[in-house]
Image: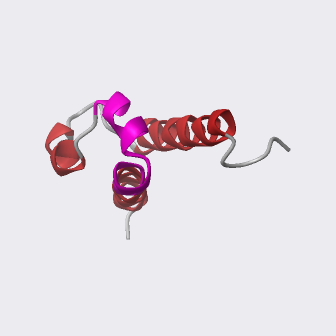
Amino acid sequence: MKPLTKTLSKISHLIRYIETDYPELYQHLDENPVTLSSHMGAQMDTDSMQNYLETLKSILHNYKLEKGIIAAS
């Protein structure tokens, strides 16, 4: 699998996880995993999508910390 395709797959899975398990957070993401692929344009590259994935992970992690779902390490 190409790196960009793999990254996009990870993004889609993470967004679906947030949508399912943390709907209160999902509503603030302003995301729609179904339309993610329709935004594929010349500006989308592996690095920018990897940065976006890391941002989503960070948002989820910080949300879990804030809600006491996980403990700070």
Task: Choose top left, top right, bottom left or bottom right for residue 23.
Answer: top left
**Secondary structure mainly formed by the magenta segment:** helix
Of residues 14 and 20, the one drawn nearer to the viewer in this rendering: 20
Q: Residue at x 40, y 62 (%)?
A: 6
Residue 29 magenta-highlighted: yes
Of residues 73 and 42, the one drawn nearer to the viewer in this rendering: 73
Q: Quarter of the image containing the C terminus?
A: top right
In percent of width and height, residue 37 lies at 19, 48
In percent of width and height, residue 71 lies at 78, 46
Instruction: Locate residue 25 relative to residue 41 in the image: left or right.
Output: right
Q: Quarter of the image containing the N terminus?
A: bottom left
Instruction: Locate residue 62 relative to residue 56 in the image: left or right.
Output: right
In percent of width and height, residue 27 lies at 32, 34
- Give the extent of the magenta segment: 16-30
Tell which residue pokes out farthest to the bottom in this image: 1
Of residues 48 and 32, the one drawn nearer to the viewer in this rendering: 32
Q: Residue at x 17, y 50 (%)?
A: 34
Instruction: Locate residue 67 relative to residue 18 in the image: left or right.
Output: right
Residue 43, above or below 71: above
Residue 4, above or below 50: below
Of residues 36 and 62, the one drawn nearer to the viewer in this rendering: 62
Total number of numbered labels?
0
Task: Choose top left, top right, bottom left or bottom right for residue 42.
Answer: top left
